[in-house]
Image (tube, rainbow, N blue to C red):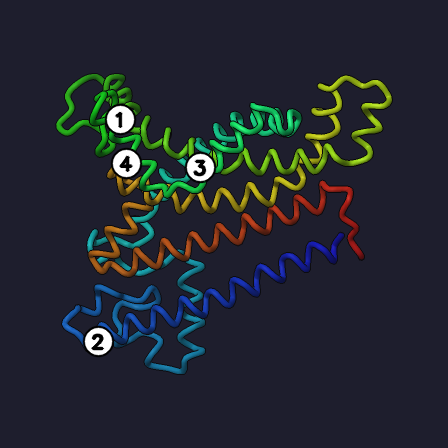
């Protein structure tokens, strides 16, 4: 077991090391380009120094890399040229907002996709199963921005049920409760779109995992012993299908995170997606690269935790000491 854990940690560190070299090269290229252009060096200020002049380029490359990595571990990503504050301060609130949105969409998506996927697998090739497969396939392969536009048109333009722009009504006047309800109303459509994306992506995985487990011999044996369908599905099949779903769920959460960036931009929400695109167009590279580094870091941590949890919980995995 210790060998398995150390192997997973080592692989994660290797990937992080490779990605850190790529990011370091990107920072260096941006800084070098700024020196020879009409852009102020402070616009692309490296996170390990105030300006390009006294950055890692004044010494050997490996010394600069060590300084850069040291700054990363201190969450020093440089200074935002657009917001005139440390890049980490500009990223913090939008990042928290996006994480909360994604957690809500994934949890609600799982609550809805799990019974749909299980029922579809149990009623294989039935009318219900065919409808679930058709709808989930079409919706899953529909680009996020097209799905968002359709929902915005019907619920915001045609029926005028929900607002389409921003986090709250401009110049809103009212009580604290009324302001909270106004903000909640602005989040209904973005959360609705993200939940649909989550459901359509997860229901297919749940169905596939359950179909694989239901075909196993121990499930047929449980039926032969006279156990009820509910007991077999919940106590035997679903418990074992959950192991294979762990990796898929972690991978899907990362995909949904990128989809939410598009949704946030279209609804003009103060999340990581909008911040990323706005900073990219404004050439605020410190914020752009801070976002990328944080996404890579949390993706690697998520993969590591998933691998460790799967290896510990799944009795089918045989780990050599």
The residue under label 3 is 138
Q: Nearer the viewer, mark 1 or mark 3?
A: 3
Check disc 2 and report the residue beneath it: 35
Q: CA distance from mark 2 to mark 1?
A: 49 Å
Residue at (21%, 24%) from the top-left corner? Answer: 158
* Residue 209, horizontal then vertical, whole percent: 65, 37
Q: How far apart are labels 2 and 4 at the CA level? A: 42 Å
From mark 3 to mark 2, how far is it between C-alphas? 49 Å
In the picture, the quarter occupied by the C terminus is bottom right
**Where on the picture, by quarter, is residue 97?**
top left
Mark 4 lies on a secondary structure that is helix
Q: Alpha carbon of mark 3 to alpha carbon of mark 4: how far? A: 16 Å
**For marks 2 and 4 on the same chain, the one whose residue lies earlier in the sequence:** 2
Foreground disc of the pair 3, 2: 3
> What distance separates the C-alpha of mark 1 from that of mark 4?
9 Å
Image position of 53 (left or right of 8): left
Q: Which badge, 3 or 2, is on the more N-terminal residue?
A: 2
Q: How far is mark 1 from mark 3, CA to CA?
A: 19 Å
Q: Mark 3: few, some, or many residues within 10 Å (few <14, many ≥20)?
A: few
- The residue carrying mark 1 is 154
Can you say whether 205 is above or below 62 in the image? above
Q: x, y percentage for residue 59?
A: 37, 82
> What's the residue at 41%, 39% (across, down)?
99
Query: Tag 2's secondary structure?
Result: helix
Callouts 1 and 4 close, C-beta under 8 Å:
no
**Residue at point 47%, 65% (across, down):** 19
Residue 226 in the image: above or below residue 244: above
Q: Which residue carries the number 4 mark?
A: 149
Local packing at callout 4 (Cα closer than 10 Å; few below 14, some 14-19, many 20+) is: some
């Amino acid at each position: 077991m210790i060998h398995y854990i150390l192997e997973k940690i080592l692989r994660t560190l290797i990937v992080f090391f490779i990605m850190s070299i790529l990011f370091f090269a990107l920072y260096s290229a941006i800084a070098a380009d700024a020196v020879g252009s009409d852009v102020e060096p402070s616009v692309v200020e490296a996170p390990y120094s105030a300006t390009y002049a006294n950055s890692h380029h004044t010494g050997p490359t490996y010394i600069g890399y060590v300084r850069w990595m040291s700054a990363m571990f201190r969450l020093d990503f440089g200074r935002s040229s657009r917001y005139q504050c440390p890049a980490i301060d500009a990223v913090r609130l939008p990042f928290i907002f996006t994480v909360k949105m994604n957690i809500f969409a994934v949890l609600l998506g799982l609550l809805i996709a799990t019974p749909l996927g299980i029922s579809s697998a149990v009623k294989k090739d039935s009318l219900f199963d065919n409808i679930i497969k058709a709808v989930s396939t079409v919706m899953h392969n529909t680009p996020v921005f097209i799905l968002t536009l359709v929902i915005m048109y019907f619920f915001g333009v045609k029926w005028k049920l929900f607002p389409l722009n921003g986090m709250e009504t401009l110049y809103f006047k009212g009580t604290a409760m009324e302001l909270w309800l106004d903000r909640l109303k602005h989040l209904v459509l973005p959360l609705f779109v993200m939940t649909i994306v989550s459901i359509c992506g997860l229901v297919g995985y749940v169905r596939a995992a359950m179909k694989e487990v239901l075909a196993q011999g121990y499930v047929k044996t449980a039926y032969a012993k006279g156990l009820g369908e509910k007991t077999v599905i919940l106590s035997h099949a679903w418990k074992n299908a959950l192991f294979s779903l762990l990796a898929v769920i972690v991978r899907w959460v990362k995909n949904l995170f990128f989809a939410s960036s598009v949704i946030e931009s279209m609804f003009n929400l103060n999340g990581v997606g909008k911040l990323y695109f706005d900073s990219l167009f404004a050439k605020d590279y410190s914020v752009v690269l801070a976002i990328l580094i944080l996404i890579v870091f949390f993706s690697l941590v998520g993969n590591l935790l998933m691998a460790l949890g799967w290896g510990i919980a799944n009795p089918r995995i045989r780990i050599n000491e």
